[in-house]
Image: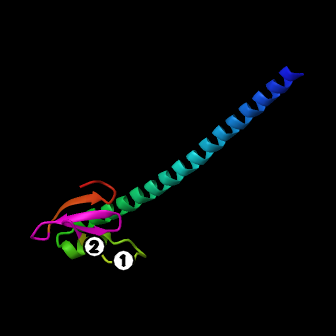
Amino acid sequence: MAKSTVLIAMLAIALAGTNAWWAYNAIDAGISRTYQGVSLEDNREALRQTIAIISEIAKLNANRESIIRAAAVPGDNSEPLEKEGFVWVGKIGLRFDEAGELVEAVPGWSPQ
């Protein structure tokens, strides 16, 4: 009788342990998918902005202000922010030279 009780207790502990492991993995996968979704949306927005900038630069009369306007995110009422030599608009940073020419564009999540 004692052997069967010990065996049942061991199996119950093993079952609880495996259930905890599965629950942890399910929660971890959910969190990872959430971060992946946010990252994908950030990349989509940066790509949309970049394509808009390229279309604006292809025009002969593109200047700093028109490029910043092209990069603006629709529905976002925030003003462009100038910091560390970049003008931050939405998900990208734009660096201009003294003449107002675009010299560099970086995503907001990359190190400079």
Which of the 4 quarters of the picture holds residue 78?
bottom left
Q: Which residues, given as a range, are shown in magenta?
A: 83-100
Q: Residue at x 31, y 61 (%)?
A: 50
Residue 58 visible in the picture? no
Q: Position of residue 75 (x, y in %)?
A: 43, 76
> In the image, what residue type sits under mark 2?
Leu
Q: Residue at x 77, y 29 (%)?
A: 11
Q: Residues within 10 Å of mark 1 (few under 14, many from 20)?
A: few
Q: In the rendering, which numbered label is found on residue 81?
A: 2
> In the image, what residue type sits under mark 1?
Ser
> With 12 as the anchor, is 44 left or right in this view?
left
Query: Disc 2 versus disc 1: distance between alpha carbons?
Result: 9 Å
Q: Residue at x 17, y 73 (%)?
A: 61
Which of the 4 quarters of the picture holds residue 1?
top right
Q: Is residue 73 above or below residue 13?
A: below
Q: Nearer the viewer, residue 12 or 28?
A: 12
> With 37 as the anchor, is 91 left or right in this view?
left
- Quarter of the image where the C terminus is located: bottom left
Residue 79 visible in the picture? yes
Q: Position of residue 47 (x, y in %)?
A: 36, 58
